Amino acid sequence: MTAIRVDLQIIADMVAPDTRALDVGCGDGALLAYLVNFKRVDARGMELSQAGVNACVANGLSVIQGDADTDLGDYPDSAFDYVILGQTLQATREPREVLRQMLRVGKRAIVSFPNFAHWQVRLRMVFGGRMPQTASLPYKWYDTPNIHLCSIDDFRALCADMGVRIERAIVLNSKSRPIHMPPLLANLVGEQAVFMLRRD
Amino acid sequence: MLEDLTDAERTALAQCRHAVLGAERPLRLDCGVDLGPYRVAYQTYGTLNADKSNAILVCHALTGDQFVAERHPVTGKGGWWDSLVGPGKVLDPARYHIICANVLGGCMGTTGPLASEPGSGQPWNLRFPVVTIGDMVRAQAALLDHLGIADLFCVLGGSMGGMQVLEWAASHGRRVFSAVPIACAARHSAQNIAFHEVGRQAIMADPEWKGGDYRLHQTVPARGLAVARMTAHITYLSEQALQRKFGRALQDRNALGFGFDADFQVESYLRHQGSTFVDRFDANSYLYITRAMDYFDLAGAHGGVLANAFRGSPTRFCLMSFTSDWLFPTRESREIVHALNAAAANVSFVEVESDKGHDAFLLDEPEMFRTLAGFLKGAAAVRGLKEAA
């Protein structure tokens, strides 16, 4: 239980020790377990699949079954230092509202998502004439849970529109390694991005 | 106080511990009556560790008692939570000091309508004050004071036991490190009150009940209590479980009898459940305890907002429900989870897939055991509770 996925590690590194965090869509609880065990974080999870929840709780993690779109509303303002949403924003019904709720419930929000302007996506769309299928977007158009895909620049625009401050933005290549490029290029080369946001 | 015991109480008390409490400071009941002295019969398993950090309180359900994990002195059957409590089980006495007390109003040694009224020396019967889940929990808290146990590593229980767990967390949260309410609700629903009322009416309609003074008349309202149990028992099972177990199978015959004997296996089963229940339970006690469940409404006690019951709660919660439980369905547990979230409490919630209905919490449900084991492991790590030696 020492190694976690590279993109999860990047999120974990953004979280300060001894804080409170809510991981929305926590899956099998890998990030939660890391935060609890290595950063003494009071970490809670919310997961859509009951099987995922049961596995997490059986591992000693505090997790409930819940939906990012509907259940964030239960929590009081500023209940957490961080609300984390990993690779899930694009699957929510109302991403803007989910972001708003995350920043209400948490002092900071950490969001990661696949970049829909990645060059492979663009190529497949423009020259292939087909809906893109890549490593980070493996679904067919008819079975994808991703109903609100966006590019890194789209996301920046939404943040600006919502008046949300971007504290950190890390763009990852296809090997989940951080890349350092001007935004225009990052939006082409980056396969996914991790943003840390704060209410302004 | 100890002199007017029933045979069952005498047998029970011979196999467990008891404390006489409230002689100096009586228990102020929700109905306004001061009760004292009163007796609490309880059982313990395992040893309290040096820093008194390994105590677990198990809260029993409507017809349960303090004999959680041993041969029952009255019925001769195994303990009601044998599957969970015992050496090598999730609640291992080698690691935890496990306590279970018969509830106030009960009939296995704790003071209830069977006890004698101070002054008159006569059994309380229906003159016994109506008690609530809150009163039951206050009596348990008084027992812990008496035992010198300041706080509990965990309080857990199913059904009415789960209601007590919620009450513990709401009213004595500082003493509760972790809480596991299973298959329960924060308030008794109209349907559940209705079923209880059918049971009570069956008891009171039995001519042998004698206005509750049956012991004076040396009668037993066995028929009424048996019918109450039969009705209740149906609510503990799921439709699928009944169908799977019995279907339309006939009992000891090859054809319908064209009469009113127990033609069907399901009838025979219910009759058996009813008649064996009468041997171990008291009718008046049944009236009082069902009433306590009916009166339970945690939100009502906190200005109508359930979250207020848990504001600032330091307790770690783990709720469980069962998919086929229609007496305390999952949505009731979810309401509690929403309220706990609104109070930003630390909560886990697992819905266990089972077709066994409400009874599932008493049965061999590996997913429930896994969940509880994981939750307790996590809680013990945070508490700094060491592994069993």
Image (spheres, coloured by chain):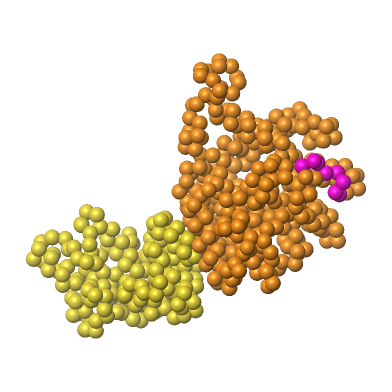
Chain colours: A yellow, B orange
Q: Is residue B296 visible?
A: no
- Of the pair A173 and B243, the residue shown nearer to us: B243
**Image position, residue B190 (x, y; %):** 59, 42
The residue segment tinted magenta is B1-9
Residue furthest left as drawn: A127
User: In screen coordinates, is A124 left or right of B284?
Assistant: left
Quarter of the image where one finds residue A140:
bottom left
User: In screen coordinates, is A117 left or right of A96?
Assistant: left
| Vertical position of residue A35 compared to residue A64: above or below | below
| Vertical position of residue B162 compared to residue A158: above or below | above
**Image position, residue B171 (x, y; %):** 66, 62
**Image position, residue B129 (x, y; %):** 78, 47
Quarter of the image where one finds residue B253:
top right
Q: Exactly how many numbered labels are in the figure?
A: 0
Q: Is residue B271 visible?
A: yes
Name the residue: 59% across, 71% down: B386
Q: Is residue B4 magenta?
A: yes
Q: Does the magenta stretch include residue B235?
A: no
Name the quadrant of the C terminus of chain B.
bottom right
User: In screen coordinates, is B76 left or right of A147?
Assistant: right
Residue furthest right as drawn: B119
| Vertical position of residue B264 compared to residue B361: above or below | above
**Image position, residue B179 (x, y; %):** 59, 61
Name the residue: 24% across, 81% down: A179
Name the residue: 55% across, 24% down: B251
